[in-house]
Image (spheres, rainbow, N blue to C red):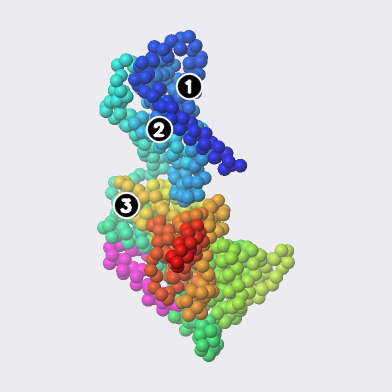
């Protein structure tokens, strides 16, 4: 029914526009015709004023609503026929109403289509319109040389409220309306519309159009003054930039600052390299590699070898992990960053005012800009008895287990996210009896249900006990009591690892005293600015994602905006963000999956290629998994992808590149991929899309042609 209404409205509009041109109605809306009929029209106004005013009003609304040429001539006519005051009144309301009708028509006919095709871009525009749309619209309305009909149609594609559009249009077009109507009162002296808009007058309108932007700048300056009014800005600064935290976000920020020769101080309270190097990405992947080798030994029969149970010293295995950390440490060390030109300080930083940072309560430094990159820490839920039982987290387990001769025999992992799932598989492969407890109804809740089930089935096959729908209630000694639909379940353990997520480090940095808003993370704008435009936040402390590569991505924006924002600022771009869960097989993700697309109302088609017949995957005995790509309906434009495969984190890079640069499946299909490799899976997925969209009629004609050629 909705589509029928759209078609009907479109036909009416096209019919009206076609009639305008077919019957040369535009000839009536010319300056020559207006001057020739001025007296006749004036007489009509004198004889039947209400009819003349009403008819003119409706005609003006129609011309504007249909985006027809002639509005400028009609505005002149209003002045010639009705005079300055009445003419301005009639045109002001008629033009605003007509523009609003064009706005509504554009929204009704085109908004859904544009949303489906350019969903993410439209969302970004909508955010800007919501924030500054009235300013931008007013600026455009104050410049009569800008085609108003384009403004009407373009704004209809955004989420701007109709009332806002109408009121701003009414106000913004008033100045130009008065000029044109006033010119119409002197119609005899006008030979063309260029006589009305002289270069000087156009220049005046342009300056007038800049007024809202200047007003916005002034309001921004006033806001800054209010924010900073309680503080005295130093006359000179010790540093251009102070960075708090030497994890991924802080290191990259400091590196960029030093590269462009800024004077940068980097302050770290614990260990250089942050969580990723010391307790996160690096040690966990080292553990996963060892666990995979143990699993391969145990399943060596799949490769034609004699399987055997792996024997290993747990202490030696943990020592290998710490040796790997030590090998990578120099890249993130104080020495390296000092050589790069960064002033590195070890100690706890606290922001005293918008420009001053205190280190360990003894030394104060000032900087023009400050970047907070304090990271995050494991969230530990309030589970009675947990503290007494003794628990581990992804931060503490590496040191706590170091030096032990034996691996814990029974391990309970609380949490079904990426960290908990990776650790569950790894420890199970090393021989522990692992039970994973998740309150939700499935593991990896951000992935599609089929992905969650695939991973869960793989873990169960390797001996992991998965208890979804179980809420951890309390610990009684070395036993976790969980609730499953009102029934208590007892789960004994030797060690319990809490992996239910991470929370931003927000305390102890002076944020509360400065009034910097926090809501689980530091609240920032699109430029990563906090309440104070010279204080930025990046990485886990800022969110919305907690990935090392995401923190590094944000760091570029923070560094550039902090150092060069006076001249130009850059909005952060999160449009193409990949991530991976390093189970075996890995789960890699970028853009939309089915779950997120459905939640956001994005139309999509699913393209799927299973690895069962991928030659390299078969040769590697790793042909369990799939590539699933979401595309715009009927198009090859990629909306997102999920890959479940060995080395999926590497395979997804091609899709990330394609999405970032607007490359569709047709071009991936036309790209030579080395044989035999796992990367061919992406090309074969593109081939599946091509087969699903093959031109059946053309193929039928080709079949007939080839039969004819047989003779």
For label 1, the SS is helix
CA distance for labels 2 and 3: 39 Å
For label 3, the SS is helix
Say whether residue 189 is magenta. no
The label number, if any, that marks residue 148 in the structure image: 2
Say whether residue 341 is magenta. yes
Q: Is residue 572 above or below residue 194?
A: below
The label number, if any, that marks residue 57 in the structure image: 1
Whether residue 389 is visible to the viewer of this picture, yes or no, is: no
Q: Residues within 10 Å of mark 3 (few under 14, many from 20)?
A: many
Boundaries of the magenta span:
321-350
How far across and how far down the image is residue 655, in percent?
43, 63
Residue at the image point whose x is 34% and y is 72% from the top = 330
Q: Nearer the viewer, mark 2 or mark 3?
A: 2
How far across and how far down the image is residue 373, in percent?
41, 59
Which picture quadrant has residue 88? top left
């Amino acid at each position: 029914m909705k589509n029928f209404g759209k078609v009907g409205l479109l036909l009416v509009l096209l019919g009206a526009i076609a009639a305008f041109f077919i019957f040369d109605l535009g000839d009536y809306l010319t300056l020559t015709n207006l001057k020739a009929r001025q007296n006749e029209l004036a007489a009509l106004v004198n004889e039947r004023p209400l009819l003349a005013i009403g008819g003119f009003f409706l005609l003006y609304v129609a011309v504007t609503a249909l985006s027809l040429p002639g509005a400028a001539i009609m505005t002149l006519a209003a002045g010639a026929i009705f005079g300055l005051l009445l003419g301005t009144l009639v045109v002001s309301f008629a033009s605003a109403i007509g523009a609003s009708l064009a706005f509504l028509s554009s929204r009704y006919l085109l908004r859904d289509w544009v949303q489906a095709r350019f969903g993410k871009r439209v969302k970004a525009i909508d955010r800007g319109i919501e924030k500054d749309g009235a300013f931008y619209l007013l600026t455009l309305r104050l410049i009569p040389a800008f085609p108003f009909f384009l403004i009407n149609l373009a704004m209809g594609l955004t989420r701007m409220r109709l009332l806002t559009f109408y009121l701003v249009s009414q106000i913004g077009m008033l100045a130009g309306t008065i000029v044109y109507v006033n010119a119409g009162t002197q119609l005899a002296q006008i030979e063309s519309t260029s006589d009305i808009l002289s270069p000087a007058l156009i220049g005046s309108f342009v300056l007038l159009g800049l007024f809202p932007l200047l007003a916005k700048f002034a309001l921004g300056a006033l806001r800054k003054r209010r924010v900073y009014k309680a503080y005295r800005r130093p006359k000179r600064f010790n540093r251009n930039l102070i960075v708090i935290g030497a994890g991924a976000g802080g290191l990259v920020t400091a590196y960029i600052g030093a590269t462009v020769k800024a004077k940068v101080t980097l302050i770290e309270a614990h260990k250089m390299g942050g969580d990723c190097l010391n307790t996160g990405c690096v040690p966990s992947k080292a553990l996963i590699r060892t666990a995979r080798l143990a699993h391969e030994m145990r399943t060596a029969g799949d490769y034609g070898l004699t399987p055997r149970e792996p024997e290993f010293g747990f202490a030696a295995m943990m020592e290998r992990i710490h040796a790997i950390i030590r090998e990578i440490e120099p890249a993130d060390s104080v020495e390296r960053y000092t050589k790069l030109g960064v002033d590195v300080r070890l100690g706890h930083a606290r922001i005293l005012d918008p420009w001053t940072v205190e280190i360990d309560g003894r030394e104060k430094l000032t900087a023009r800009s400050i970047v907070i990159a304090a990271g995050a820490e494991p969230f530990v839920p309030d589970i009675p008895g947990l503290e007494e039982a003794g628990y581990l987290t992804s931060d503490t387990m590496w040191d706590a287990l170091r030096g032990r001769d034996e691996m814990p025999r029974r391990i309970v992992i609380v949490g079904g996210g990426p960290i908990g799932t990776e650790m569950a598989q790894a420890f199970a492969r090393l021989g522990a009896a692992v039970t994973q407890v998740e309150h939700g109804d499935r593991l990896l809740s951000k992935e599609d249900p089929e992905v969650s089930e695939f991973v869960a089935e793989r873990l169960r096959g390797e001996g992991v006990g998965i208890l979804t729908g179980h809420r951890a209630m309390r610990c009684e000694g070395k036993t976790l009591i969980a609730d499953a639909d009102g029934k208590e379940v007892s789960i004994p353990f030797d060690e319990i690892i809490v992996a239910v997520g991470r929370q931003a480090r927000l305390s102890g940095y002076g944020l509360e005293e400065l009034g910097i808003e926090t809501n689980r993370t530091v609240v920032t704008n699109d430029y990563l600015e906090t309440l104070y435009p010279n204080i930025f936040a990046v990485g886990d402390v800022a969110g919305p994602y907690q990935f090392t590569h995401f923190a590094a991505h944000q760091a570029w924006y923070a560094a550039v905006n902090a150092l060069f924002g006076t001249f130009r600022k850059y909005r952060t771009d999160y449009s193409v963000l990949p991530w991976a869960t390093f189970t075996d097989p890995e789960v890699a993700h970028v853009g939309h999956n089915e779950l997120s697309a459905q939640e956001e109302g994005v139309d999509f088609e699913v393209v799927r290629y299973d690895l069962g017949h991928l030659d390299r995957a078969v040769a590697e005995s790793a042909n369990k998994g799939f590539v699933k790509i979401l595309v715009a309906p009927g198009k090859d434009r990629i909306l997102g992808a999920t890959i479940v495969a060995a080395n999926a984190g590497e395979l997804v890079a091609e899709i990330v590149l394609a999405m970032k640069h607007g490359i569709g499946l047709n071009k991936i299909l036309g790209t030579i991929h080395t044989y035999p490799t796992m990367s061919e899976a992406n090309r074969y997925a593109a081939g599946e899309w091509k087969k699903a969209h093959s031109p059946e009629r053309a193929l039928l004609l080709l079949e007939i042609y080839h039969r004819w050629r047989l003779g």
